[in-house]
Image (cartoon, grey):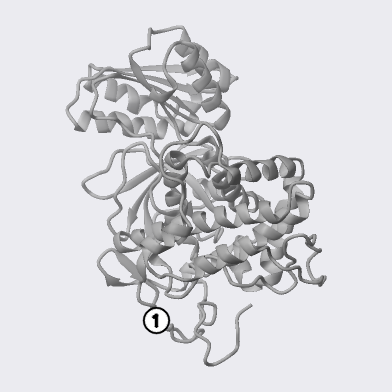
């Protein structure tokens, strides 16, 4: 809870989560931006703390020295919120781990005690990984209840954090905890874990996340695990989770700090064009207020003024343009808050917010392998960007595109793609129409070929990506040459 002492210097004392509709940002230094320092409805902001090594505030541990009141420790089962239970002392190992994490402000010293294991994934999992995976297996059947309890601990202990989340928690409810559990599951695989954590750390800047928020989340995570992993939980399991979460949170804090030097937490983007291609599909073009660097094939998170704090992922529909404009293809889906707002309400002059670019479905320009591209529905948007990227690099590698839709009317960008085909002899476009998009499109690809020498790119609904990847592997394309965005990240796209 925020303290009231006038002499306290803890990060919670003056933290206030900014809400972006309150006014324009003012540039403070190259590549960064902040809110105005004061306004009639809030006090002047305290001076920014000098950036310490690794981005955390000096003297501020990634994990707190004590838990919020009422959160039981170690062998004691965690109570329901608002019920007090006796405190149980932490094991010596746990005390030493937390004490070490509090001490050094230097990056090298911090990494001695909280680090992701170096090297590739090992054949034999570490003892911590064994304990963590045992816990994950136990909580899997009760994940929904654990998620609710996790957020109850966060919001009851720190109600001021509720304003950082959307009013309805239907989608966001699962994302934060799922991301933490996913990271913990891969604690022994830094090749997968480090890029994932760095992307999470930079992406969470747009929510207003501060280093001081991580201890709150960590304590709630421990509390929820202790309650719902009764058989596997104990001093050793708790110590393993503390070590894992400390390393995870510090990696995310470091990534956010590094990104702060180069880019703002978010961009404002004005809608300059809104073209309705079908009753449910619109092509939006926006102009960001600051330079926005991305690669063809990537995506971003987008927030509308109609649904504050609700973010959805959308792919860029073109390669980077000289005029700096960005385009998105959006399909309104039933009960989709953001998608319906963008298709049915957005108009030129409206201002959206953009998060940082993400995604690894980009062209490898170091090879001249052919490119096999599968785009289902509005998933054709990043495929179109990849085509433009190949053309701009002057390459003549063969590019084969399969554009799938449920009906002819949904082939909304067919004319644009056929126009590109006429301009580039190395490009071939094949429209595919069928009710079962997740099965029809991959099946059509299997009827042509051979594709064993091609790099594959898959974009569309999650079910289509899964079936497409399976079919591509079946016809001989190695998994390492199949590129697509993480299905878990795309689960929130259709909203």
* Residue at 27 percent of width and 56 percent of height: 291
453 displayed left or right of 368: right
- Please state which of residues 392 and 257 is positioned toward the viewer in this rendering: 257
Residue that extends furthest to the front in the rendered view of this protein: 92
Q: Position of residue 224 (x, y in %)?
A: 72, 56
Q: Is residue 350 visible?
A: no
337 left or right of 325? right
Instruction: For label 1, count other residues whose C-alpha is less than 10 Å away and answer few (under 14), some (14-19) or many (20+).
Output: few
Q: Quadrant of the N terminus?
A: bottom right
Residue 46 spot, x, y in % from top left: 43, 84
Confirm whether residue 31 shows in the render: yes
Looking at the image, which residue is at 52% across and 27% down?
465
- Image coordinates of residue 449 in percent, x first then y, are 39, 8
In this rendered view, identify the residue nearer to me: 425 or 490.
Answer: 490
- Residue placed most toward the observer, 214 or 170: 214
Residue 58, above or below 154 = below
Q: Residue furthest bottom?
A: 6
Q: Residue at x 36, y 36 (%)?
A: 297
In this rendering, position of residue 24 left or right of residue 291: right
Q: Position of residue 484 (x, y in %)?
A: 44, 31
Looking at the rendered image, the quarter that the C terminus falls into is: top right
- What residue is shown with label 1? 37
Helix, strand or loop under label 1: loop
């Amino acid at each position: 809870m925020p303290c009231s002492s006038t002499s306290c210097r803890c990060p919670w004392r003056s933290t206030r989560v900014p809400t972006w509709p309150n006014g324009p940002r003012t540039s403070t230094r190259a590549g960064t931006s902040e809110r105005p320092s004061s306004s009639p409805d809030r006090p002047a902001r305290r001076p920014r703390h000098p950036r310490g090594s690794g981005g955390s505030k000096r003297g501020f541990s990634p994990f707190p020295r004590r838990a919020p009141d009422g959160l039981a420790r170690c062998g004691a089962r965690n109570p329901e919120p608002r019920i007090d239970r006796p405190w149980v002392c932490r094991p010596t190992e746990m005390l030493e781990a937390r004490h070490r994490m509090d001490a050094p402000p230097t990056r090298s010293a911090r990494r001695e005690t909280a680090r992701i294991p170096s090297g590739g994934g090992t054949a034999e999992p570490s003892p911590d990984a064994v304990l963590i995976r045992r816990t994950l297996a136990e909580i899997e059947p009760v994940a929904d209840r654990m998620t609710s309890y996790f957020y109850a601990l966060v919001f009851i202990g720190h109600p001021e954090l509720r304003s950082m989340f959307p009013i309805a928690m239907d989608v966001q409810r699962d994302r934060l905890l799922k991301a933490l559990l996913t990271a913990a599951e891969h604690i022994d695989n830094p090749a997968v874990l480090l890029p994932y954590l760095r992307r999470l750390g930079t992406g969470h800047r747009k929510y207003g996340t501060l280093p001081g928020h991580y201890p709150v989340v960590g304590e709630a995570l421990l509390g929820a695990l202790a309650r719902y992993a009764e058989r596997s939980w104990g001093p050793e399991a708790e110590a393993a989770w503390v070590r894992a979460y400390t390393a995870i949170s510090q990696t995310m804090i470091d990534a956010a700090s590094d990104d702060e030097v180069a880019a703002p937490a978010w961009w404002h983007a004005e809608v300059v064009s809104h073209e309705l291609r079908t009753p449910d599909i619109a092509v939006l073009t926006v102009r960001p207020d600051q330079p926005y660097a991305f690669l063809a094939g990537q995506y971003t998170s987008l927030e509308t003024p109609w649904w504050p704090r609700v973010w959805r992922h959308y792919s860029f529909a073109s390669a980077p343009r000289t005029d700096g404009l960005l385009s998105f293809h959006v399909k309104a889906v039933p009960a989709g808050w953001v998608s319906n707002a963008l298709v049915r309400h957005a108009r030129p002059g409206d201002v959206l917010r953009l998060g940082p670019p993400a995604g690894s479905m980009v062209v490898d320009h170091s090879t001249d392998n052919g490119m096999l591209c599968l785009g289902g529905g509005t998933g054709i948007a990043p495929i179109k960007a990849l085509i433009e990227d190949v053309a701009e690099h002057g390459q003549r590698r063969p590019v084969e595109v399969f554009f799938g839709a449920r009906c002819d009317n949904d082939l909304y960008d067919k004319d644009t793609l056929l126009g590109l085909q006429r301009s580039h002899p190395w490009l071939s476009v094949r429209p595919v129409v069928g009710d079962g998009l997740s099965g029809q499109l991959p099946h059509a690809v299997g009827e042509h070929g051979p594709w064993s020498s091609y790099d594959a790119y898959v974009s569309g609904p999650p079910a289509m990506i899964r079936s497409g990847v399976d079919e591509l592997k079946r016809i001989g394309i190695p998994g390492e040459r199949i590129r697509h965005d993480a299905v878990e990240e795309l689960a929130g796209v259709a909203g």
